Image: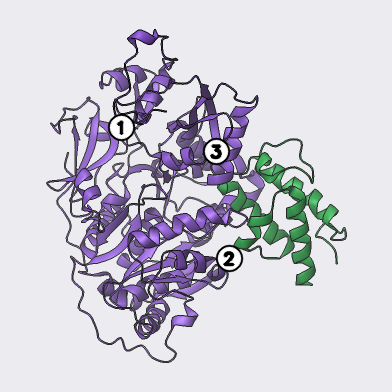
Amino acid sequence: MKGPPAVRPRFETLHEMLDAAAQSGQSLFFVGRDEKDRQIPMADIRRDARAFAAGLRDAGVAAGDRVALVLPTGPEFVACFFGVLLAGAIPVPLYPPVRLGKLDEYHRGTAAMLRAVQVALVVTDERIHPILGVAAADAATRLGCVTPSGCTRVGGHEINPETRTVADDVAMIQFSSGTTHDPKPVALTHGNLLYNIAAIADYFAGGGMPDPVGVTWLPLYHDMGLIGNLLTAFYLSRPLVLLPPELFLAVPAAWLRAISRHRGTVTAAPNFAFGLCLDRIRDDELTGVDLSSWRLCLNGAETISAEVARRFSDRFGRWGFAASALTPCYGLAEASVAVTFKPAKSTFKTVGARAESLASAGVVEPGDKELVSTGRPLAGVEVEIRDDDSGPLPAGRVGRIVVRGPNVMAGYLGRTDLTEQVLHDGWLDTGDLGFLHDGELFVCGRSKETVIIRGANHAPQDFEAALGGLPGVRTGCAVAVGYIPAESQGEALAMLVETTSDAPPGLASDVAARVLQRTGITVDHVELLASGTLPRTSSGKLRRLQARAQWLAGTLSPPQKVSVLSQGAPAPGSKRC
Amino acid sequence: MTLPSGQSATSAAVAQEIIELIKAESDAVALGPDSALQDAGMDSAKVLSLVFRIEARYDIELDAEDGDDLRTVGDLAQLVARRIRERS
């Protein structure tokens, strides 16, 4: 399935894009925690970016160096992101620590990401600086850790020597779904980003929205917020309203009020955000709010619930929200951000499928599991469904979703081993399962083991490692899987855990408490299992996807008792639980 | 020194307000100053929301390092009461 022909981007590099945006007279609007707006002209962003770039050069940053950005949503993030680029270096946005969170986990994860791309310098704000010093030291960053003000050349912005950047140069690195210990650095070129943004802009234009006004609370270290919102606003020289993510989480009505105040037309958010709005916004918080300007409400980055989407449209229709605005979409970090969008001006489609035939036979038969269409490929993007031998599958058959296009990453930086696993002849194996129906893509599962919670990808190993040393759990004999609980609004985490014979009562709550404490993610279900129940490979490795399928089908059962005589000896060198 | 509710900013008064804020975030029913924060079922999104509400309500700032020695609701209340004193 092919999208429209690729659209040539207006700019060859993000540098050219910044120059054009700075001359447009447009601004970013940063919403404070009191919901007051602070207007920052794009011209000021460019000025600050140039002074910062000069400071980076003075500090010893060289062309091609990786510079990590650990900054909250604010003008400094944007100026530093472009400043790193202007210095000829490569920005690597990373998530800031959660306050009141456990710092040792944060240090470990951050140090692993810094090491994975050999970051030369970490840029962070005054509040986070004392904490990041540890991670930066652990990762032995060449130039340490600085704040933007400590790295800005006062009164000067000549960047010497100027570097010539071309479309094939790496423009940024975003971390995808590797484990905390082995993160996957997705390297995106200027061309990757600009082709993807040009395709998004083409969709806007085709949908009669050539001049969008974006309103976002998405974190800027996430592809949807950074590329889909921020860089797209610069590309089109259009205003963007940015809320801190925690303002949205605490006061979701602030998002809708900002849309109303700025006559916002386009937003992007994961499924959970719509559930949060339904649960937490009171009618009296929306007095005077008018959502009729909201033309495009993208819903992606995690499994989409048709019911939540419909309830959202029904409820907020009273304030002028149009059901046709709700736009399911599909994408992933390895494809920059966006792959498919619902066709503009239509209402999103669903199919009712039989869950058992999807999972076991890979065919779409009528049933009561409602799946949401994520639409059609954007300009220049191709999507195919393949079987396990990479053969193309016809419509109505479930297989691996593969994607090709100018937005697909060059590879994981410095990790040809990982790159070769997912890129073949320009086709990216997304690790997601889906099927084509009526010329649209439906995502219905995953061939990768990633667990997606609130739009963020998590490796199961991180949840499993949290159980290390917990009395009652057989060492290394637990798997973490994602699933959609009945009557739930989205994906949740389940732990399938083999227990020791002396497991204490209350072990299930111990497991849930430990995972929450170590990872900040709530466990929705704990299944305690007899020793040897989890399916394994012949070498003793746990098979997570099979364990998940058996658990959901109710066929996860303890091993049959066998006599000692018939029991084979373990293969030499194999590690049995 | 008083709370937005008009009470004086003792740890006990702050603890009661924080318990109410946590209850607004999670399904936890029986919470007291000695309850472990993790028993309140606060995931990372709820913690972000709680921190935001605490900072906005008391006009203080909590730091990332603050989390390391917090175990109970009472610990959090003491920290908040200390920040309120430092502010005024």
Secondary structure of residue under mark 3: loop
Q: Secondary structure at mark 2?
A: loop
Badge 2: few (under 14), some or many (20 or more) residues near its Cα, within 10 Å? some
Which image quarter is the C terminus of chain A in? Answer: top left
On the same chain, marks 3 and 2? The answer is yes
Mark whose residue sits in front, 2 or 1: 1
Identified at 12% across, 46% down, the residue is: A425
- The answer to which quarter of the image holds residue A9 is bottom left
Distance between mark 3 and mark 2 Cα atoms: 43 Å
Q: Is residue A552 left or right of residue A284?
A: left
Residue topped by disc 2: A32
Furthest residue toward bottom = A155
Write down the residue under mark 1: A573
> Which amino acid type is marked by label 1?
Gly
Task: Identify which amino acid the numbered label 2 is placed on.
Answer: Gly
Badge 3 amino acid: Gly
Indicate the position of residue B1 as horizontal and vertical percent values.
Answer: 85, 67
